[in-house]
Amino acid sequence: MGTTTLILGGGWGGLTAAHHLRGLVPSEHRIVVVERSQKFSLGVSNLGLMVGKRESVEQIQRDMAKIKRPGIEWIQSEIHSIDPQQCTVETDDGKLTGDYMVLALGAELAPDSIPGFEQAAHNLYDAEGAVAIQHQLKGFEDGKIVVLVAGTPFRCPAAPYEAALLVEAWAREHGIRHQVEIDLYTPESIPMAVAGPAVGEALSAFLDKRAIGHHFGRQITRIDPATRTLWFGDTDVSFDLLIGIPPHRAPGALENAGLNDAGGYVPVHPQTLEILSDPDTLEVKYPGVYAIGDVTTVRLQNSMFLPKAGVFAEGEARVVAAAIAATINGEPRTGVYAGNGFCYVEVGDGSAAYGAGDFYAYPGPRVTLEEPSTQAQAAKEEYEDLLDLWFDA
Ligand SMILES: Cc1cc2nc3c(=O)[nH]c(=O)nc-3n(C[C@H](O)[C@H](O)[C@H](O)COP(=O)(O)OP(=O)(O)OC[C@H]3O[C@@H](n4cnc5c(N)ncnc54)[C@H](O)[C@@H]3O)c2cc1C
C-alpha cells in the first residue's frame, strides 16, 4: 500500500527533499509539500536584485503551481500546528496525515522585534525590500550607507558582507564612491565566526581593501526613522540609507509541538537529521520524523551551530530523502550527513571567493576561503539554475 510523506515547507530544503524522494520511491507513494506561499525564490537572488543585476521580483520567482516533476503534490496552506507523534498537521485546509514527515519550515524574519526597523530599514532578506534598495541606490548621490545585522543567528552568514561589498562596487561603477561612506554593524565578534578566525580575517581584509568600515559586537536596540539614527545601547550612529538584515525567529507553527530547544529551533541528530529529545545524549524523539535546513539547530564539535544556509538544507534533504526511501522500500539505510559545506562570497566586480570545508571536524570546523575569481562568481550564479530545473516557466 502507498505511503504519504508530508514535507512541511516548500523552500530550498523542502523542494530538494521532494525531488530526491520522488526519484527513489515508486509512484504509488505520495509526496505532499505543504507550503503557504504561491511563489518560490532563492534568497541569494536578492543580492542581484539589490544592485539591479535582476530588475524585478517576477524575474527571480517561480510559481509553485508549475512544479515540473510529476508526482510532487503541492498543497498551498498555512500550517498551524504539528503533531509529530501522530504524524499529522493542522492547516487552513484541515488536518493532513502522513506516514513520514520532514520539517523544512525555515526561519522567520522578525523586523518588528527592533523598534523602528520596519520604518527605517530596507529589508535585504525580503525580495521586495531588495528592489526598494535598488530604487534607493538609483537616486543616491552622496551620504552614508549602513548595512545592519540586527541579530544572530541569521541566514547565510556571508550575505551582509556581500551586500556591503556589492554596494561599494556599485558606487565605484557609478562614479560616486568618493561621496559615499559605507559601514557595516553587526553583533558578531568576527565575520562568519563559525568558519574560524582565518576566514573572519580574510573577510575583514576584503572590507578593508574597499574602505568599508566594520563594527563588530554592536547589538542594535532601536532605530529612530525620523532622525535616521541607529542606537546601540547608549551609542548612536547616523545613516542616509539603511540596508537591514532583520532578526530571525523560529517558525510560529512550531509552537506547542514540543520540538524546539531554548533558542526556538529544532535540535536534530547531526548525521541522520532525526529530531532529538536531548542534544547531549543524541536520543531520538520521533523515529520517522526529520527536520532539515534553517529550522534546525545542529550542534558542532566546538558547541557552535551549523550555519543557516541553503547548501546545508540541500545536503540534509538528500540524506533524509534517502533514509525515508530506504524505509519505504524495505532496504537498509545508507548514507549520513557529513557536514560538508561551501559558499561563494560575492565581492563585487564580477568576482566571488569560494569557501568550503568540513563543519563537523574536531575540535571545530575546518574551512578555507580562496582568493576571489570570476569562475567562482559564475558557479554562484548556477544556484539559480534550480528555478528552471524545478519549475516550468
Ligand atoms: C540574501 C540572501 C542570500 C543568501 N545566499 C545564500 C547562498 O549564497 N548560499 C546558501 O547556501 N544560502 C544562501 N542563503 C540562505 C538560504 O536561502 C536559506 O538558508 C535556505 O533557503 C534555507 O532553506 P530551508 O528550506 O531551510 O528554508 P526556506 O527556503 O526559507 O523555506 C521554508 C519554507 O517554509 C514555508 N513556511 C514556513 N512556515 C510555514 C507555515 N506555517 N505554513 C506553510 N508554509 C510555511 C516558508 O514559506 C518557506 O517557503 C541566502 C539567503 C538570503 C536571504
Image: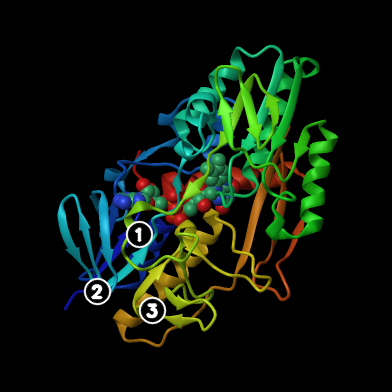
Disc 3 residue type (three-letter)? Lys
Q: Say left or right for 108 vs 68.
A: right
**Spatial distance from mark 2 to mark 1, Cα to Cα?**
19 Å
Q: In the rendered view of the protein, which quadrant contains the N terminus?
A: bottom left
Q: Residues within 10 Å of mark 1 (few under 14, many from 20)?
A: many
Q: Is residue 78 above or below residue 99?
A: above
For image coordinates 69% across by 34% down, the residue present is 234
Using the rendered image of the protein, determine whether residue 279 is visible from the camera's viewpoint. yes
Q: Are marks 2 and 1 in contact (CB under 8 Å)?
A: no
Q: Is residue 328 above or below residue 186?
A: below
Q: Which residue position is annotated with label 3? A: 285
Ligand 1 within 8 Å of the CB at mark 3 = no
Q: Is residue 370 above or below residue 266?
A: above
**Spatial distance from mark 1 to mark 3, Cα to Cα?**
15 Å
Q: Residues within 10 Å of mark 2 (few under 14, many from 20)?
A: some
Task: Select label 3 or label 2 by which is in front.
Answer: 3
Q: Which label is found at residue 198? A: none
Residue 329 appears at what percent x and percent y? 31, 82
User: Counting residues from the N terminus, which is met first, the one under dot 3 or under dot 2?
Assistant: 2
Q: Nearer the viewer, residue 204 or 174?
A: 204
SS for dot 1: helix
Disc 1 residue type (three-letter)? Leu
Residue 257 appears at what percent x and percent y? 32, 65
Q: Which label is found at residue 99? A: 2
Q: Nearer the viewer, residue 60 or 83?
A: 83
SS for dot 2: loop
Residue 65 appears at what percent x and percent y? 26, 44
Residue 103 appears at what percent x and percent y? 37, 63
Disc 2 residue type (three-letter)? Asp
Q: Which residue position is annotated with label 1? A: 254
